[in-house]
Image: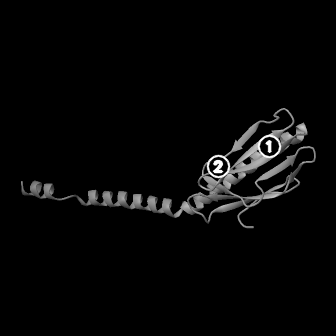
């Protein structure tokens, strides 16, 4: 009778160890998630920069196939980031608009707000460097350079 009363008042050693293991593993998982945040953000922004390059490359290839031109216009949003608008000039998509906006990143750009790509000559005038940056961690950014010859490059430093 006395042994049952003593058992009801306290926890077994196994129960205490199980609770400590659960708390320890949860704290390790949360610490890993918090410490991995800049690296994760860097991967996200790099993917955004690659997606932007791919989007532009496909439009350049389409313009070259049709010997068309398009105008690249940058419009600034209220959060001081930019959207990229393409207006087709000639070809099957004449005067159609296409808009590229970023999901996780913001686009920064200093320079001319209107660029022209000639499919006939496969040139972009003038060449441009866009900054694809994180909205959460401002230090995380990638530079997307589109050269006049249509070549593109992504770097984390200029």
Task: Describe residue 96's horizontal placement relative to residue 42 as left or right.
Answer: right
- What residue is drawn where x is 44% and y is 59%? 30
Residue under label 2: 102
Task: Describe residue 100's horizontal placement relative to residue 10 as left or right.
Answer: right
From this viewpoint, which residue is outermost toward the top?
Answer: 92
Residue under label 1: 58
- What residue is drawn where x is 60% and y is 63%? 138
Where residue 141 sits: x, y (%)?
Answer: 66, 62
Where residue 3 sits: x, y (%)?
Answer: 10, 57
Packing grade of label 2 (10 A; few <14, some 14-19, many >=20) is some
Where residue 10 sits: x, y (%)?
Answer: 17, 59
Packing grade of label 1 (10 A; few <14, some 14-19, many >=20) is few
Q: Is residue 3 above or below residue 83?
A: below
The quarter of the displayed image where residue 154 is located = bottom right
Which circle marks residue 107 in the picture? none
Q: CA distance from mark 1 to mark 2?
A: 17 Å
Give yes or no for contact between labels 1 and 2 (Cβ–Cβ under 8 Å). no
From this viewpoint, which residue is outermost toward the left?
Answer: 1
Callout 1: SS: helix
């Amino acid at each position: 009778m006395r042994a049952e009363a003593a058992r009801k008042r306290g926890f077994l050693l196994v129960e205490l160890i199980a609770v400590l293991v659960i708390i320890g593993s949860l704290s390790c998982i949360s610490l890993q998630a918090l410490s991995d945040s800049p690296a994760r953000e860097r991967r996200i922004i790099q993917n955004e920069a690659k997606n932007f390059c791919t989007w532009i490359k496909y439009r350049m290839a389409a313009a070259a196939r049709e010997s068309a031109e398009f105008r690249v216009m940058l419009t600034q949003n209220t959060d001081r980031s930019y959207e990229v608008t393409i207006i087709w000039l000639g070809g099957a998509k004449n005067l159609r608009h296409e808009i590229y906006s970023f999901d996780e990143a913001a686009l920064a750009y200093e320079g001319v707000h209107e660029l022209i790509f000639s499919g006939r000559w496969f040139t972009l005038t003038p060449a441009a460097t866009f900054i694809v940056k994180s909205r959460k961690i401002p230090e995380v950014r990638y530079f997307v350079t589109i050269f006049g010859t249509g070549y593109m490059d992504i770097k984390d430093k200029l």
